[in-house]
Amino acid sequence: MKKILFVYNAHAGKAAIRSKLADLIDMMVQRGYRVTSHPTQYSGNATELIMQEGSEYDLIICSGGDGTLDEVVTGMMQMDEKRPIGYIPMGSTNDFANSLQLPKNVRKAAEIALDGQPFACDVGQFNDNSFIYVAAFGIFTEVSYQTNQELKNLLGHAAYILEGAKSLLDIEAYEMRVEYEDTILEGEFIFGMVTNSISVGGFKQIAGKNVLLDDGVFEVTLIKRPKNPLELNEIVTSLLARVDNTELIYSFKTDEIRFYTEKEVTWTLDGEYGGSHNQVVIKNWHRAVEIMVKSET
């Protein structure tokens, strides 16, 4: 009998999964699987579990937000023989689920996790860590949990900038040297993100157009520090108009990028704390894990 390891965050999405657990496990059993369920107990628990026990199962299904998926993928990257991952999104944003076109309906998402087809997607290596869809630093990550929800909906992703930039003096900038391919960028940056996702922070196409999750490259966006209110307005206008390459905004694709700073910079990985670093090397692991998606008809 095939076996499923079902890992879930019981607190994700206002703990909505608790009322659906019996139905989800019943679906898995009806497909002929023996099911082991495990509610995560602390940050990093899913990673530890996958590393220690993942090889004993035929399919790993996780439910929670993108952070839960990130932990499962991080554990999977440590396995010699990787297993396909089913993802039932239950978080508040579910960026990567949107990129994979997974439905918000829990039962439909579970059906894809069980009966869909595996899709080999890229994974990011961040120093000795990993991420599934975004590594970021700066003003977006500083303000994202404080911005009024109605303001987010009204102004889109530029709301983060507007909320954080009530004064130019409030914007923290990071003196950086950025290297990729044959290019070197040096300057003060207020924001940067390395992504493999169509949606980031709930906003679609923030990473640009023609984003593919299995093309072996990341989409990179870096925003320079505005020197005056006019430049700040130029940045906001460019973001609202989806103009992603200006004198103040760098936008490009690469499979490897390096960041060097004298002062440690705090990063987020898939929306979770990624530590403070003064040297960061990010590489693309091409088609490194398989995630179940809707079967093509």
Image (cartoon, rainbow, N blue to C red):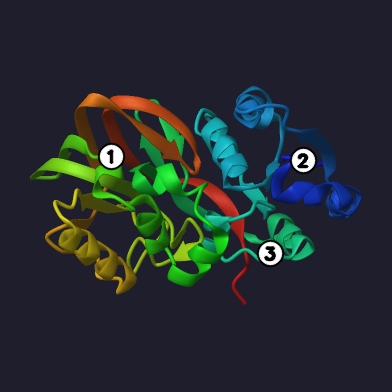
Question: Which residue type carries mark 1?
Answer: Glu
Residue at the image position 60 percent from the left and 25 percent from the top: 51
Specify the farthest residue to the bottom. 297
Give x and y (percent) for residue 27.
86, 55
Mark 3 vs mark 1: in front: 1
The number of discs equals 3
Above or below, 38 against 153 in this view is above
Q: Disc 1, disc 2: CB below 8 Å? A: no
Q: Position of residue 87 (x, y in %)?
A: 65, 51
Which label is found at residue 253?
A: none
Mark 1 vs mark 2: in front:
1
Disc 2 on helix, strand or loop? loop
Q: Quadrant of the N terminus?
A: top right
Indicate left or right for 127 with 268 as reference.
Answer: left
Left or right of residue 263, residue 10 in this image: right
Q: Which residue is mark 3?
A: 104
The span from disc 2 to disc 3 (Cα, nearest Å) is: 17 Å
User: Considering only order in the chain, which callout, 3 or 2, is on the residue closer to the N terminus?
Assistant: 2
Q: Is 160 rendered above or below residue 281?
A: below
Q: Position of residue 92 (x, y in %)?
A: 63, 54
Q: Residues within 10 Å of mark 3 (few under 14, many from 20)?
A: some
Amino acid under label 3?
Answer: Lys
> Which comes before the other along the chain, label 3 or label 1?
3
- Residue labelled with disc 1: 172
Compute the Cα span from label 1 to label 2: 36 Å
Q: What amino acid does circle 2 point to? A: Ala
* Residue 188 shows up from this direction: yes
Name the one closer to the observer, 188 or 43. 188
Q: CA distance from mark 3 to mark 1?
A: 36 Å
Q: Name the residue tied to disc 2.
A: 10
